[in-house]
Image: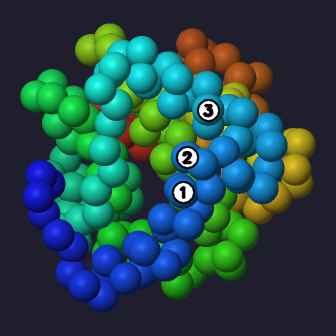
Amino acid sequence: MDDYQADPMLQSFADAKIMPIIDALIDGDYRLPLVQTAFDGLVEQANKCYPKGFDIAFSDVLNENDPEGKVPFGIVGRKTGTPIIGIFLPIVLALYQEMDRTTFESFIVISFCHELIHLGSLAETDKELTTWAETCQQVIRLYVEVYGEGIDKHDWEFYSAWIQCNGDAESDSWRSFIVQNYGAHA
């Protein structure tokens, strides 16, 4: 995705609907203070692993690791230099058209934080099993339990499964749920 520019219509969507949310987080001005604090901690952890930081890039092509086109965010370049959090605009635009604005906002924040959790671990064994558990604990829980805000159905499914296993990322039920959703990438 280096030096890649998204389709102008999709880039306009990203500039108008996605970047204001991310900019508020980066600037420390997000409207939910505990979510802002969680985000700041995740950035700090990612920066410990990648002292030169990370980049954000938009793409109108599918994630190479997701041939079915279901994953809206991903990380590229992790092993070759500065990691890039890629945002795959066709998928995000389709989701935007299905969600109310508050739910879309939480989706962007949760997805971005999920990728930051991945970046905050240098371990090759860092898989979705622990990353989703941390996403539920550190971010989704705040939206649901503290602020009573809506989250999208995908995040709700993960959060519900996490609650059902009492937040135990090592439980058989959590492992089974993650494997159902990620297969070998769990």
| Residue located beneath label 2 in the image | 26
Helix, strand or loop status at disc 3:
helix
Q: Are marks 2 and 1 in contact (CB under 8 Å)?
A: yes
- Number of numbered tags placed on the structure image: 3
| Residue located beneath label 3 in the image | 40
Residue at the image position 21 percent from the left and 73 percent from the top: 6
Q: Is residue 149 visible?
A: yes
Picture disc at residue 23: 1
**Sequence order check, earlier mark of 3 and 2:** 2
Q: Amino acid at mark 3?
A: Asp
Q: Amino acid at mark 2?
A: Ile
Q: Are marks 3 and 2 in contact (CB under 8 Å)?
A: no
> Alpha-carbon distance for marks 3 and 2?
8 Å
Helix, strand or loop status at disc 2:
helix
Residue at the image position 23 percent from the left and 65 percent from the top: 59
Q: Name which quarter of the figure residue 167 lies in.
A: top right
Query: Callout 2: 10 Å neighbours few (<14), some, many (20+)?
Result: some
Helix, strand or loop status at disc 1:
helix
Where residue 169 appears, x then y in whole percent? 59, 18
Q: Is residue 186 visible?
A: no
Q: Is residue 155 above or below residue 52?
A: below
